[in-house]
Amino acid sequence: MDIQAQLEQYRRTLNEWNHRYYDLDAPVVSDYEYDMLLRKLEQLEQEHPELITPDSPTQRVGGQALEAFQQVRHEVPLQSLQDVFDAAELNAFFQRVGQQVQSPNWIVEPKVDGLSVALEYVDGVFVRGATRGDGQVGEDVTENLRTVRSIPLRLQDAPHRLIVRGECYMARSVFQKLNAQREEEGKPLLANPRNAAAGSLRQLDPKVAAKRRLDCVIFNIQLTDGPSFETDSASLDYLAGLGFPVIEHPVLRTAEEVSEWIAALGEDRERYLFDIDGAVVKLDALAGREQLGETAKFPRWAAAWKYPPEQKETTVQDIVIQVGRTGVLTPKAVVAPVRLAGTTVTNATLHNQDFIAERDIRIGDTVVVQKAGEIIPQVVSVVREKRPSQAQPYRFPTVCPVCGAPVRRDEDGAAIRCTGAECPAQLARTITHFASRGAMDIEGLGPAVVQSLLREGLVHSAADLYTLDPARVAQLDGMGEKSAAKLQSALEASKSRGLARLLTAFGIRQVGEKAAQTLSRTFRTLDRLMQASEEELVAVDDVGEITAQSLLEWFASPQSQHLISALREAGVSFESREQPIGEKLAGKSIVLTGTLSRYSRSEAKQLLEAQGAKVTGSVSKKTSYVVAGEAAGSKLTRAQELGVPVLTEEEMIALLEEGTAAPAAQTERE
Ligand code: AMP
């Protein structure tokens, strides 16, 4: 067989296997066999790159990353649907259609909660795929769609031109796995499968999209120069014959049948691999559709029934508190098991302390729960009449249920947070932050390594990093002797980062890099800082009352004390590396403009600040001096207008040394 024929045979076989696996749900070979053949094809294509075709199954793995998506104007707009929310609205729809079309047939379809896309084929080859966008103009996401296994890249016996419309979605099971993985990696969780699908389809790097394992289901022909049909159902059957994963679309004869189908679907939503947010009713006859036409937004021949979120009553058996990675205490109601939107619910989110207090939710209460798109159901309300007489108002804990450290309410929100420096619930995050760039800058200690260290029980606090046994570290997944040795020297180097970095690494609330530097420059050593009174702290620039309070609380906690003494023992430096604050320019406010020759802007800023000056970005009457370098611009003009003294770089240096200046510019002006 020649190479070309061999390649084609591999591709045909793989495409067939794909179709059976994804569209027909009837795999004929194991994943292993599939991967082996794919590998063979890849190898052959690598040897003959000129023979790679865009419809090759190897192209599904994701090509080059894009800078941005191209816009695509849809030849046939991707319209929206008219919503109906109750039986009366649905009947009105039936009547409107019935006035123009005699004894209509209906097709009903689940309304997939995903993302609408248009897929374009030329001579049977998938050439372009676009998101719906505003219905008229969408984005070209062809490369990402190529990675969706249920989208055929090549069709058999297809017309010259064909554009179909469908819905891309992330299967519930894939979504759950993805979130479990994100949780493990400490990444924020995705809200629901719809958002996850939308985010994945709009990834600029198709390799990321490929990993997300999206799926697609087709529900319409947008345009074709192929055969014409009398009914929508016939056109969908035709698409199924071409190899598309077509949506379920029973044809029903009466309004009653449609209503029954909609009701049954609402009860049986878990039957589908995807989330559905409604049912779509469409007139089957295409001539009838033509006759009814459309409004500016949606066709007059279709309606989308929206299911209200299902609600059920249940009882609160307990209220438990979970401590998240960021230390936030989240209350959760443990409820008596109840069936809701296709799953058995045993707990419901209570959001935060205020949510419980506002609704006065108590253990023993009967509550109404609902699920609306999200994974975890919510408590909607309390059924007061059913409250047991002994039920007590719920008291939110004042200490962390995991580590016992005091909790504290965020100044700017409803969240209650644990303040424990060594709280096990937050350890992954605390340690990753400790090792991060702006903090102790420990190279090689990213979230994945931190996770393995925790999993193996090798660290229980940031201080344990310094007593790690390199031989043991070398045995961790993905490590080895070389990486372990590197980590060891990075840890060694981090010991001398100095007080400012250490304070940042502690992750004390309100104490960011800037405040940490000022504190370090002012107090010089950690021990001196720990002895500082509230007044002394508040007197420091960048430290207000809230920050001072936060520092005092943090240092007072036994966990922090333990951490500090372990770090001291490990030989971590508690000394400031910043220049002490001079007094020469205390109270002066200075603006830098133009390019200086001896110093960069940030060096000059540091020098001035080290002498107590405040360096700001804009000139006002209160500005003490403007230092103007080469090509100074509007700030210089503004200084001259306001009569603010202007200094040259040399004059600035003199100012730093002597603390006074007689600026030339000012003399000139006088
Ligand atoms: P809406 O977003 O409420 O305007 O509803 C219209 C959207 O429903 C369309 O843009 C499609 O993305 C989506 N949809 C999901 N399933 C279907 C279906 N079976 N038929 C038509 N549209 C559907």
Image (spheres, rainbow, N blue to C red):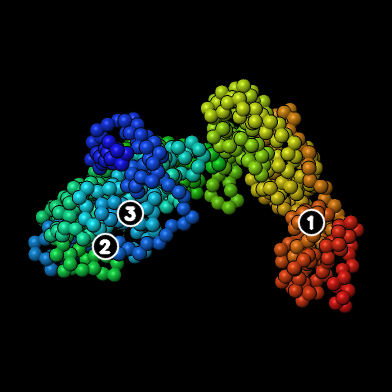
- Quadrant in which the C terminus appears: bottom right
> In this figure, which residue is indicated by the disc labeled 3?
127
Which residue is situated farthest in the top direction here?
Answer: 471
Q: Which residue, as the protein is rendered here, is positioned at the far bottom?
A: 670
State the separation of the CA atoms marked 2 and 1.
Answer: 65 Å
- Check disc 3 and give the amino acid type: Val
- Which quadrant of the figure has residue 89? bottom left
Marks 3/1: CA–CA distance: 56 Å
Q: Residue 180: x and y, percent?
A: 43, 37
- What amino acid does circle 2 point to? Gln
Corner quadrant of residue 120: bottom left
Q: Nearer the viewer, residue 438 or 56?
A: 56
Residue 350 as seen in the image, left or right of residue 105? right
Q: Residue 567: x and y, percent?
A: 71, 31
| Quadrant assignment, res 127 | bottom left
Under mark 1, the amino acid is Tyr
| Residue assigned mark 2 | 82
For the residues labelled 3 and 2, the Cα–Cα distance comes to: 31 Å
Secondary structure under tag 1 reads: loop
Q: Is residue 599 shown above or below 196?
A: below
The count of marks equals 3
Q: The residue tagged with tag 3: helix, strand or loop?
A: strand
Q: Residues within 10 Å of mark 2 (few under 14, many from 20)?
A: some
Work out whether residue 263 can be spotted.
no
Name the disc covering residue 599, or none. Answer: 1
For the view shown, which residue lies furthest in the front direction? 2
When the figure is inspected, residue 195 is found, relative to residue 402, above or below; the finding is below
Is 102 left or right of 154, judged from the image as shown? left
Near-viewer residue (133 or 189): 133
Mark closest to the chain's N terminus, 3 or 1? 3
In the rendered image, the quadrant that contains the N terminus is top left
Q: For the residues carrying marks 3 and 2, which lies nearer the camera in this image? A: 3
